[in-house]
Image (cartoon, grey):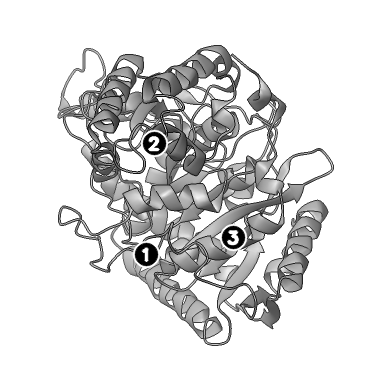
Amino acid sequence: MTDLHRLSIRELSEGLAGSKFSSRELTEHYLKRIAKIDAQVQSYVTVTPEQALAQADAADALRQSGMANVLTGVPIAHKDIFCTHGIKTTAGSKMLDNFISPYDATVVAKGKVAGLVTLGKVNMDEFAMGSTSESSYFGATKNPWALDHVPGGSSGGSAAAVAADLAPFATGTDTGGSIRQPASFCGLTGLKPTYGRVSRFGMIAYASSLDQGGPMARSAEDCAYLMNVMAGHDDRDSTSVNVAADDYVANLNSTSVKGLRIGIPKQYFNVAGLDADVKARVEESLKKLEEMGATLVEIDLNMTDAYVPTYYLIAPAEASSNLQRFDGVRYGYRCENPVDLTDLYKRSRSEGFGPEVQRRILIGTYALSAGYYDAYYVKAQKVRRLIQQDFLKAFESVDVIAAPSAPTTAYKIGASLDPVEMYLGDIYTIAVNLAGLPAINAPVGFDKDQLPVGLQLIGNYWSESQLLSVVHQYQQATDWHTKRAAIAEETV
């Protein structure tokens, strides 16, 4: 079958259950697509055909024995920040180019239990630091909608792989928008869950109080299937919260759009730099939701100006702490012929880390240094609490909050944006991570250059089912999520 890559996760599951095709046939189909197409997209860092086919054969055997799960035999791509046993796990960095993980991250292990077939590991900004996937040691991933544009970041490889139909769905991580922004740039659905909903064990840390794993796929329904695998408490993760996970697939129609109160923060739609096409597409999607029965309620989020400076103190500070373990001694990159221990540390880190990672380590180390800790880091944490309270006050009068996922569509590769301009592009996403809230991106149209635009819906704590349900119903009434880039239409 030449069109297996066009099937939804539900259709793939039903096809496998009905013996319309085997997991081996499905896996071979995706491996052939990767071999033919990915040289143009560069979404994969590592492809694992031998392991994938072995997993596919095991899945087919389970199907024959009647012991299969709903997703047994469905392929997946993992962001290269999730440790995978026996496979190189790089976090997009030269520092870990030689690291073969001795264990599986919880997310990967749960995928194996569910019978998912791992196609390989996909590219990302180095240590998840970036908004374009250009900071990867392995080169820039391309946006399947326009190969001279970025796919977003840091989960750009995950987004590009799904958008090019090189995987039916993928795992991502979101520290300040790294699921939602690339989903927006690549015309996908991407969910950032409540902090603590998905285990961080085996997920290489960037900023521990902000990082959260989540699903990336074409539709809310596809994301729901992967959330059923990813979500749940994990004793090995001290930040995992013991709140029962939902059956996200069963709950896809649990929230009616009719009567839903959608908060429209007036500050979000007056941000300098908000592209006119992005604003228009988002407003059109909100009008559609209003036609479906939702009520639009103007709200105030008064802490908007504090989002970027607060985030870019806390995140680099935590990165500085987390990345100190990469010293050239225990594992990872080590410089050649160091003259002494100090030289070993200095050169291993300066040669192993790229410019953006070094920049954030320096910012974070400064913010944590004696004499500045209270003035910067502690104050930022206090402001973080005010940002959380601002959201909670808004949720007293609305059910979800709407915003663009990004102020623009995808940038051109190599665009001369300086780091500060790039950081300002995170204005709509980073507050969600600071507050620990869940949020989802849904594709809602295109700009004048036919690049995808995304709507972001932000929910209260543990409201992933509600967000998936609202987007699912929107997608039942629209077809933006079914649109495919020309490269995805290529056959093998």
Residue type at mark 3?
Val
Q: Using the rendered view, name the quadrant where residue 188 is placed.
A: top right
| Mark positioned earlier in the residue sequence (3 or 1) | 1
Counting from the top left corner in percent of width and height, residue 151 is at: 60, 36
Residue type at mark 1?
Tyr
Determine if residue 174 is in view: no
Task: Sort mark 3 into few (<14), some (14-19) or many (20+) by Cα contacts within 10 Å.
Answer: many
Counting from the top left corner in percent of width and height, residue 205 is at: 31, 46
Residue type at mark 2?
Ala
Q: Name the residue under label 3.
A: 471
Foreground disc of the pair 3, 1: 3
Quarter holding the C terminus? top right
Foreground disc of the pair 2, 1: 2
Q: Do the residues labelled 2 and 1 touch (CB within 8 Å)?
A: no
Q: Is mark 2 on a helix, strand or loop?
A: helix
Tag of residue 377: 1
Task: Sort mark 2 into few (<14), some (14-19) or many (20+) by Cα contacts within 10 Å.
Answer: many
Distance in Å between CA atoms under marks 2 and 1: 53 Å
Image side of residue 309 versus residue 276, left or right? left
Distance in Å between CA atoms under marks 3 and 1: 36 Å
Q: Using the rendered view, name the quadrant where residue 96 is placed.
A: top left
Determine if residue 268 is in view: yes
| Mark positioned earlier in the residue sequence (2 or 3) | 2
Q: Is mark 3 on a helix, strand or loop?
A: helix
Q: Is residue 449 above or below residue 4?
A: below
| Mark positioned earlier in the residue sequence (2 or 1) | 2
Q: Do the residues labelled 3 and 1 touch (CB within 8 Å)?
A: no
Q: Is residue 394 above or below residue 401?
A: below
Image side of residue 199 versus residue 410, left or right? left
Quarter holding the N terminus? top right
Q: Mark 2 points at which residue?
A: 17
